[in-house]
Amino acid sequence: MPKLSVRTELLVAFAALAVLAMLPAFTSSKALVDFVIRAAAFGLFATSLNLLVGYGGMVSFGHGLFFGLGAYSFGLLMQRTGLPIPVAFALTLVISALSGLVIGAICVRLKEIYFAFVTLAFQMLLHSLIVSWVPLTGGDQGLLGGIPRPTFFGVNLANHIHLYMTSAVLLVVGLLLMRQIAQSPFGYTLRMIRDNPGRTSFLGVNVFRTKLTAFVLAGVFASAGGTIMSLFVSSAYPDFAYWTMSGEAIFIIMLGGTSTFLGPMVGTVVLLLLNDVVTRITPHYGLVLGIVILLFALGLRKGITDFIVEWFDDRRTARITAADAEEGAR
Amino acid sequence: MTRKKSGLDRRSFMALAAGGAATLSMPHIAGAQAKTIRIGMPTILSGRVAQLGTSSRNAAMMEVEKVNAAGGLAGRPIELVIRDSKGQPQEAARVARELINTDNCEMLIDAEASTGGFAVHEVARDLGVLCMHTNSETSSLTADPKLRIPNAFRCCRQGIHDSAAGGNYAASIAKAKNLTRWGVVSPDYAYGRDTTAEFLMYLKRFAPNVEVITEAWPKIFQADYTEAITKLLQAKPQALYSCLWGGDLTSFIDQSAIYALLNQMEFFAVNMADYTALTVVKNLPKGIHSGNRYIKTFPQTPANAAWGDGYRAKFNEYPTNWSWQNALVVNMLAAAAKKAGSADGKKMAEALMGLKIETPFGADGTVTMRAEDQTLIGYAIGWGTTIPTEPYVPGVTPGDWKQILELEAEWKKSKGWA
């Protein structure tokens, strides 16, 4: 995506939010409203993973940890403390940031496959903790009794449209913040580390601190996604912190593309559509998904947005080359 | 240009208008009465327990045909809208919401296993629609007042009932054969842990000499049971309890046969007496003690045998434990609609409280939806021993519902739920 000014990006974000806000006025489809809420949860989760994978070159197999942590932290805070929703949400982000700091301090020093597997180990540790700490978490039955949603500033999250609007705001604000992070000097340093950590280090950059910051930030955004999901299902389940959740996020960014900022969001929408349509038609969802993975892995060998961006680049290059050749001939 | 005179005088016009108004309103009422009622049914149609989900779907559809032939729910024919949740709770929640919000279903038959069942329960709490849980046996779903909602009911077995009946039966065998040293092999998740603890609680209550000397907790859907089998062989208990189920139970029995494990001890497997397990084990050992799940010979009535045979004839497979529960729910809903004189979810929920219906699956030919905790009681419950061929469990000792209910009340009190 070309670099835009902060003002332009703010305008784009505002326009996107306006479109989302107006959507319920044009359709009575509750399925569409549900779809946007789920897309907000998974979109934040997948885009935050892309901060690590696409921008930082850190392939985390355990990113679902933060999705699950967000869902459980928020759910438990609401069930047990009776705090107002914004306070519980802020505390959830703080808990995720602190957890990210501790886990990241151990993981980001590791390289490639070791990083991937240690993050996976931490995720499975959280999953085991959730399953075995039954009095607190409800074990494998998840948080029972629903998540209370007291009204705050006139917002009643028990109302579906209010939940939709809140999710849309969180999605747009989250994406905007991640975009600013990716386009900031910090984001470019992260790319530099991804491409050549040794050289970056020689330039005086503290590689560990930069990677750790990215890890913490990605965890915070993923936990925001988990919070939205917990509000949607009015509970939290161990599956949210299981390795398959991380696998799903990896698949989303593979599907959508890692080289563009909105690639994971596109992947999220496509995967959710695929899920919703295919499960209506056949119980062989896994088979269809497997074929789609094969098509992308063996056919396109890149994500949807990567493919589109490259296609436009190729066309532009061809046009310039043709123009140059024409000029040369004259 | 001459103005053409209308062929209607004022009186005729008024009569026609009144008739028109009547046609607009009356057929609307008649249409509403005859309008199909859509019932959403999230269940597991893919993955390792797909067979159970399919058997739930089959049984429900079979009964819907009968209910529709008899006039449907208060005159409205039922249309089941069945969706796969893949056994994932968040997917079960999504599908349940979609069934109500998009597919215009007016109520839910939640044919999920426990985890998905709790997720659908939260959706029912959120949307306020009538929800019938048909496969979740975890007692807390209806026993814990904190979880209870006025629009959700359990129309299936319950763990605490099985444990009370099983503990009492096992204690009588333990005392008769002097089985004091017991082992456990159960799946390591909430259902396995809770059901085992409850069974042992009642076993020890009725046979205080019993001591558990070894425990093995394989993961759910584990492929290899060698570790558990070796542990049990080393400890040499006189009797073994298990609440493994489905493919896990059959794999365990098949793998145990290599070590002749079950020849060395009495085996109590609560989930054995279900055709899905009975017909799949390669060499079904004689003498396994099991609670009934679904067998057409218990209750030994013509109605039950006819239902089992009818299912098998229609689908060319045996019904399962999930089948009778999903068949029953359709009849329960039909009876509730009849009592309420309406297919409105709220009115039906009120009618369901304390509703007693005749059914082939009742211990005495009837079952009751207990009003105090919106859960099913009086269904056929009993224990017996297996033989390798049909009827697989020839003599089932019926559980004593009076005693089961007394023990359940005590248990609820101990939990602070009564």
Image (cartoon, rainbow, N blue to C red):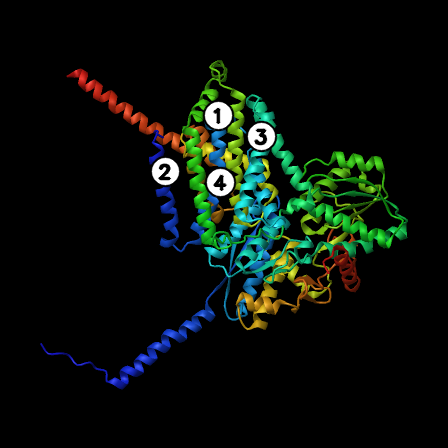
Q: Would you name the residue on which mark 3 appears?
A: A101
Q: Would you name the residue on which mark 1 appears?
A: A56
* Residue neighbourhood size for the residue with mark 2, other residues' Cα within 10 Å, grouped as few (<14), some (14–19), many (≥20): some
Please give the label number shown on residue A10. 2
Please determine whether, in this image, residue B200 is positioned above or below residue B404: above
In what quadrant of the picture does the N terminus of chain A appear?
top left
Mark 1 or 4 closer to N-term?
Answer: 4
Pair 2/4: label in front: 2
Q: Chain of mark 3?
A: A
Mark 3 or 1 closer to N-term?
Answer: 1
- The x and y percentages for residue A101 are 58, 30
User: Looking at the image, do the residues carrying marks 2 and 1 touch, with CB atoms under 8 Å apart?
Assistant: no
Mark 2 or 1 closer to N-term?
Answer: 2
The residue closer to the viewer here, B216 or A317, is A317
- Name the residue type under label 4: Phe
Please give the label number shown on residue B395. none
Residues under labels 1 and 4: Cα distance?
A: 20 Å
The residue closer to the viewer here, A298 or A196, is A196
Please determine whether, in this image, residue B337 is positioned above or below residue B83: below
The residue depicted at 40 percent of the width and 76 percent of the height is: B26
Residues under labels 3 and 4: Cα distance?
A: 22 Å
Q: Is residue B100 visible?
A: yes
Q: Is residue B220 visible?
A: no
